[in-house]
Amino acid sequence: MTFRVRASAIVLLSALALAGCTQVDQGHPGPTSSPTKTTTSLPPRPRDIDLARVDPCKLLTADQQRTLKIYQAGPGPDQTQTPAPTCSFQVRSPADFVLSLSPESKRGVEEWLDSTGNVKKRVISADGFPAVQLINMGDDWNSSSGSFCRSLISTAKGQELSMDLEPLNKNLTQAQMCDITLQAVKAALATLQTIK
């Protein structure tokens, strides 16, 4: 086997190995392409809202933060895996957890619905906008605890407003986590509609 053939074989094997990897966003499962991609239809949006150049730290007002019992807010961690900006909100009551808000202008809820992956998903509605909730595949929607919940609102084709909840202890049920993320992302959507 010549050097060129060996080098080509190594490059091909490396590419195949990388193709099987799932990109993970801040420790949570990410969407993975399906071998036969189908298009899931969502109910229509009341309007389209472009999320490009939206500052997530300006999407929850002081009153909304008080209602959600947020005591600290600031830009999220380094976005090396995701190009979208993130704002983190820390909460102590009814339990210790972190909410992460991200306006994703290059990924929509359709990508989650039309993909395989290690998340359970359900289509819901958020103030008239189509939305999706995600939990880990190993968790149950009604379990006494869970590892995370993400609520995503489809604001435009290929764009989503995403709110994650990462618990810092086991004091929240899976249903509570999903209710909190939905309440928080709906608050962000309400603010967004006043500025866009």
Image: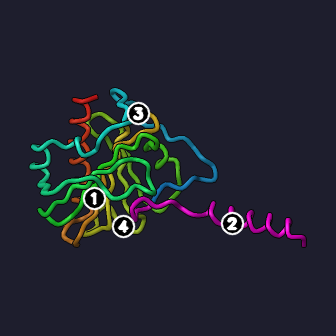
Proximity of marks 1 and 3: CB atoms separated by less than 8 Å: no
* Distance between the alpha carbons at the discs numbered 2 and 1: 35 Å
Indicate the secondary structure of the residue bearing disc 2: helix
Nearest to viewer (mark 4 / mark 3): 3
Disc on res. 139: 4
Q: Which amino acid type is shown beneath numbered disc 4?
A: Asp
Indicate the secondary structure of the residue bearing disc 4: loop
- Quadrant that contains the N terminus: bottom right
Q: Which amino acid type is shown beneath numbered disc 2?
A: Ser
- The stretch in magenta equals 1-29
The residue labelled by disc 1 is 165
Crowd band around label 3 with a 10 angstrom C-alpha radius: few (<14), some (14–19), many (20+): many
The residue labelled by disc 2 is 14
- Residue at the front extreme? 3
Proximity of marks 2 and 1: CB atoms separated by less than 8 Å: no
The residue labelled by disc 3 is 156
